[in-house]
Amino acid sequence: MFNASRPLLLLTVVACDDTVSMAIGGDLKATPSQQVVTVASFSFLPNDVERTRVEVSDEEGPLVASDWSEPGEKRETVRLLGMPASSTLTARLVTEGGEELDSVEFETGAPPPQVPVLTVTGEPGWAGYNFTSVIGTENVALVLDERGRVIWYHVSEDEVVLSRTRLRPDNEGITYLMAPGGAGKPQYLADVDWDSAEEARFAEDQHVTHDFVFRPDGGITTLVTTQIVVAGETKRSGALVELQEDGTGETVWIGEDTWPAGVNGEGPFEGPHVNTLTYDAERDWYWWTVQNADSLLNYDRAAATWHHVLGNSGADYTYVGDPGLLGPHHISLSGDTIRIHDNRDVDTNSRIVEYQLDSTAMTATFTREWFHDPPVYDFALGDVHTRSDGSMLVTWCSSGLIDDFGPDGTIRASLAGPLGAAFGYGELHDSLPGQVRLR
């Protein structure tokens, strides 16, 4: 339990005046979350002269701080993520000038047993947060730092596949997608607030699958499973749907547009098996991959047209210096340079491949490729995130590994999940809303 707080009054002398005013600030109270032990809320009286913030420290020093609160006289409340579990911590209320107005100790509880312990080897070359999930006997949505420390978590009750976790546009929590793990399994999207173990499910009748993105208007676009009719036979396939606020969906692409060109019809999907979705804000395009067509497609929202960019029969671009994609997943774009998580097969091993797209010559020219060390085969999922300096974070999802590649292509650090567990797709953020990282 945390200690009782102690209010503190500061004396401030007003220049060129003999009067003395009381600058109020203090009465700091800490409330660790009982549902998510890495979350705590803090209420306090701000200083009425200087900006104030809450700083949290462990035995090694400062960890995280809230954003600065403006001077005022009304009690404020802030929430912070990333409290180490099972720890005694100290919160301090400080002014921008460095004065401590109040401090209080508090304790965090133990996490539920489903929350994994991850291990890192090497030294990460980046600092930030990875919104991801661990998939296995349990499904847990996670926010991790670069060293695999659990900043936030949510345990799902369904034993399916928690494939995607994203920061909500309102910054008050996350939205995740539960994909099917087999016939009759639940498929839905769910919102979860930072300090709650409860979830609010929606789109349960849309057959959502694998991946989704937030549109600029705050709406959601998702991949869905659907049915198509080919030569009089009903086939299982995929589609791209823009969900509206009232819960209805507008289909902007359906798998029959690419059937049967380049699709072998084998495996659990008899039609195109869509598996990752990326929103290209610069062009207002969607990009998505079709695993069993070895293809990359995009959709121009303004023109309401779609293109078969890379792949087999009917593709727009011709490969130069590379045999092409085999079971591709997530992509990362930088202008006309594209990196793709190319799953391939057990004989050739999964890779990240980079192509330079030339829209005049209509060529996709191979420039380089990367592998885990030693190489692995990702039979499902997989993503890549490129940074401005050419470094990248790669999730070998079904292998339960996350690699931090430096600009020179070497692996600086690797993060490993529990034995037998896989990772979902990742979403990277440099910072978390409402707080500042101190260590």
Image: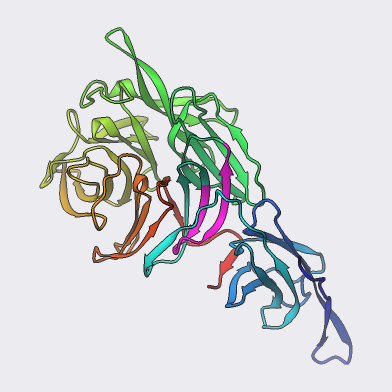
**The one of 420 and 47 positioned closer to us in this rendering:** 420
Residue 310, compared with residue 123, is above or below; it is above
User: Does residue 54 appear in the picture of this structure?
Assistant: no
**Residue 131 position within the rendered picture, expressed as x and y whole percent measured from the top left:** 48, 52
Residue shown at 27% from the left, 9% from the top? 231
Left or right: where does residue 407 sit relative to residue 139?
A: left
Q: Residue furthest right?
A: 19
- Say above or below: 341 vs 144: above
Asked which quadrant contains residue 224, the reply is top left
Residue found 80% across the figure and 64% down from its top: 75
Which of the 4 quarters of the picture holds residue 7?
A: bottom right
Relative to residue 29, is residue 411 drawn left or right?
left
Horizontal and vertical percent position of residue 133: 47, 47
Determine which quarter of the picture holds residue 157: top right
Q: Is residue 19 above or below residue 382?
A: below
Residue bounds of the magenta highlight: 141-157
Is 257 included in the stretch rendered in magenta? no
* Residue 175 x %, y %: 55, 43
The x, y position of residue 259, in whole percent, is 26, 21
| 31 relative position to 426: left or right | right
Secondary structure character of the magenta stretch overall: strand
Within the magenta stretch, is there residue 143?
A: yes
